[in-house]
C-alpha cells in the first residue's frame, strides 16, 4: 500500500483531483456567494476534475515514458474518451434530469398532495470550457509535479 502512495504519477493524479475539487468549491463560492461544501465531492462544474485527472495522467505518462510510447497513446485515448463523455453523454443526461425535474414540479403543483419525489441530479456533465480548463489544469499540475518529484 505504501508503495502506491510514493508512486510519483499516482501522487500527481491525487494532487490533481484534490486541487480541481478545491478550485471547483472556490469558483462556486464566487458565483453563488456561499460555501457549498458538498461541491468537494460532486461531479460537474468548473473545472472538470475528470478532465484534469486524465490530462495529468497523459502528461505524466508522456513526460515519464516519452510521447511516442504505447503508454502515452493509451493515456491520450483514455483522456479523449473521458472528455468526450463529460461534454456529450453526461451533459445530455444532466439536461434530461433538469427536464424531468421540471415535469415533476409541474405535476406536483397540479396534484398539491402526496409524496414529492427527490429531484434528480442535474449537474452531471461539463461544458467545453470546463473540460478545457480541467485539461489545462491537469497538464500543468503534471508538468509541475514531474519537475518537483
Image: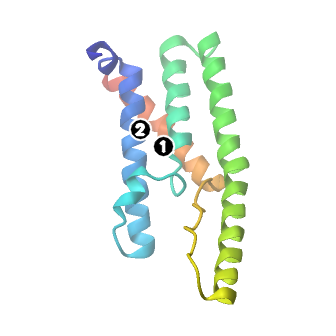
Task: Tell us which disc is closer to us: 1 or 2.
Answer: 2
In the structure shown, which secondary structural element does the residue marked by tag 1 occupy?
Answer: helix
Pointer 1 and pointer 2: residues touching (CB < 8 Å)?
A: yes
Q: Is residue 61 left or right of 84 when viewed as pictured?
A: left
Residue 118, by quadrant, is bottom right
Residue pictured at 49% horizontal, 32% vertical: 56
Task: Examine the rendered structure and indicate whether residue 36 appears above or below residue 43.
Answer: below
Residue pictured at 53% horizontal, 48% vertical: 48
Residue pictured at 42% horizontal, 40% vertical: 17
Q: Position of residue 98 (x, y in %)?
A: 66, 68
Quarter occupied by the C terminus: top left
Q: Is residue 131 left or right of 77 when viewed as pictured?
A: left
Color theme of the render: rainbow
Quarter occupied by the N terminus: top left
In the structure shown, which secondary structural element does the residue marked by tag 2 occupy?
Answer: helix
Residue pictured at 37% horizontal, 65% vertical: 36
**Residue at the disc numbered 2:** 16
The label on residue 137 is 1
C-alpha separation, residue under disc 1 versus residue under disc 2: 8 Å
Task: Examine the rendered structure and indicate whether residue 84 appears above or below residue 123.
Answer: above
Q: Position of residue 130 (x, y in %)?
A: 58, 53
**How packed is label 2: few (under 14 Cα within 10 Å), some, or many (20 or more)?**
many
Looking at the image, tell me whether mark 1 or mark 2 is earlier in sequence order: 2
The label on residue 123 is none
Amino acid at each position: 500500500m505504501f508503495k502506491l502512495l510514493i508512486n510519483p504519477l499516482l501522487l500527481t493524479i491525487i494532487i490533481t483531483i484534490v486541487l480541481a475539487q478545491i478550485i471547483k468549491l472556490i469558483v462556486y463560492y464566487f458565483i453563488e456567494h456561499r460555501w457549498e461544501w458538498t461541491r468537494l465531492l460532486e461531479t460537474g462544474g468548473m473545472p472538470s476534475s475528470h478532465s484534469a485527472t486524465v490530462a495529468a495522467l497523459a502528461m505524466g505518462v508522456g513526460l515519464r515514458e516519452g510521447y511516442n510510447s504505447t503508454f502515452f497513446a493509451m493515456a491520450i485515448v483514455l483522456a479523449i474518451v473521458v472528455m468526450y463523455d463529460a461534454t456529450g453523454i453526461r451533459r445530455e443526461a444532466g439536461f434530461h434530469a433538469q427536464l424531468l425535474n421540471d415535469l415533476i414540479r409541474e405535476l406536483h403543483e397540479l396534484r398539491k398532495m402526496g409524496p414529492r419525489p427527490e429531484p434528480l441530479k442535474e449537474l452531471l456533465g461539463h461544458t467545453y470550457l470546463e473540460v478545457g480548463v480541467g485539461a489545462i489544469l491537469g497538464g500543468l499540475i503534471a508538468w509541475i509535479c514531474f519537475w518537483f518529484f
